[in-house]
Image (tube, rainbow, N blue to C red):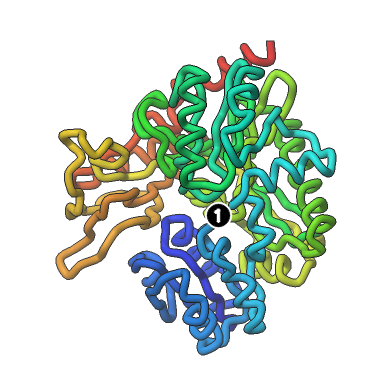
Amino acid sequence: MPGVLLVGNGAREHAIAEAIMRSGHDPKLFSYMKTNNPGIASLSAKSLVGPYEDLPAVMAFAKANGCEFAFIGPEDPLNLGVVDALLAAGIPAVGPKRKLSQLETSKSFTRDLVRKYNIPGNPRYATFTSLEGIAEFLDELPGVVVKPDGLTGGKGVKVQGDHFQTAAEAFDYCKEVLQEHPVVVIEEKLDGEEFSLQCISDGMTVVATPPVQDHKRRFVDDKGPNTGGMGSYSDADHCLPFMRPEDVAAGLAITQKVAEAIYRETGDYYKGIMYGGFIITRDGVRLVEYNARFGDPEAMNILPLLKTDFVEICRAVVNGTLDRLPVEFDKKATVCKYIVPKAYGLPKDHPDAKSTSAKIDVSGTGAARLYYASVDRKADGLYMTTSRAIGVVGIAESLDEAERIAESAISAVKGPVDHRPDIGTRALIQRRIDHMKKIRG
């Protein structure tokens, strides 16, 4: 009966907790959370609430409960060095060491690594520590993407045409970034369709999970500000409707080469999740960025489909034996839609951007799976906070049916909630297909 430590408290971690507890090895789950997640707490033998910065508390909790290994859910504890601390206490982890988590925490580290080892996928880019040379580089590119070099919760990246229009506005945003971050990364803007390819790595073997498409924009038809993610979908054939199987293969090949490059660069094997954000362009698959953990919402699309025992996958990652374990997923479609407070993502001066700590009732949600994010269970029921509240996932033989299950569940929720009804719909997906046809010519 293995003891497993889970660090994290979002809907992604709720899905991870569920996958751990489905194991045939009868694990005991011990969860360390920044804030209490009632879904994770209900699956745990014991849970502790505390800051991720308190590494001694995480170590003591893991040791006191005899944890065999840890699974690190979000990026913040990785960046703080929780894996290094646990290893020092004799507890291995599914999650990279701090210097390897730079794959996510430093955009420049990843771009430079891909360039140094001649791995395909990089767009044209340059990094700057001051304003010198920025204006000239902006003039060289027809369109740009500006990225702070550090963690921004998925909300710091700004794209020309979406968030700003001119090179002068791009320059102003670069100036703003450099006031808070040591480095700004400027990349050419690529035209295409994005997909998420979440891979599992033991440092030598890299295994892809089914590709997913995430929707960052707050409102219908991809309008409004970027959020942590309003929802996502995956298809039954483990390829998205606008993709070709060779696009998935290209993303996996890049990730395998990056895992090798990390070992050559650092001398350490990358053990954990390598989640590549890719874009299919006229010239093939390009790398948008890497994350050093599962996506939120994308974890909720793939983990419920996992047929292989998740504890065995974690052990294979820790032991470097992933090449000996066939990792399989159900051939089903999934649609995840996030329930959010109505004020979520609105500017502070918007008339609807009021406090959103409202009570909700999710008792009639039917066949959908619910993964709790920012909710608080009080004596009289479930309350939202100010962030994304619950990931609602429909799983079925087809995308149409999976979308219907998710939408039906959300319509049964009582309370002042909002969501994006268009995610996973035929109309939105057809736009992606048409866009890709145009790009491929």
Residue ranking furthest to the front = 132
How far from the left and from the top, in percent, is residue 3?
56, 81
Residue shown at the point (32%, 50%) measured from the top left: 387
Q: Nearer the viewer, residue 417 or 392?
A: 417
| Disc 1, SS | helix
Residue shown at the point (17%, 52%) measured from the top left: 358
Residue shown at the point (72%, 57%) measured from the top left: 201
Q: Is residue 310 visible?
A: yes
How far from the left and from the top, in percent, is residue 309?
63, 65
Q: Nearer the viewer, residue 379 or 161?
A: 161
87 shown above or below 279: below
How far from the left and from the top, in percent, is residue 401?
44, 35
How far from the left and from the top, in percent, is residue 284?
73, 25
- Quadrant where the N terminus lies? bottom right
**Image quadrant where residue 323 sits:** bottom right
Q: Nearer the viewer, residue 398 or 64?
A: 64
Q: Is residue 197 visible?
A: no
> Going by the image, does 436 lie left or right of 295?
right
The residue that label 1 is drawn on is: 303
- Quadrant where the C terminus lies? top right
Q: Residues within 10 Å of mark 1 (few under 14, many from 20)?
A: many
165 shown above or below 180: above
Residue shown at the point (52%, 61%) measured from the top left: 73
**Image quadrant where residue 219 sits:** top left
- Amino acid type, label 1: Leu
275 shown above or below 242: below
Q: How many marks?
A: 1
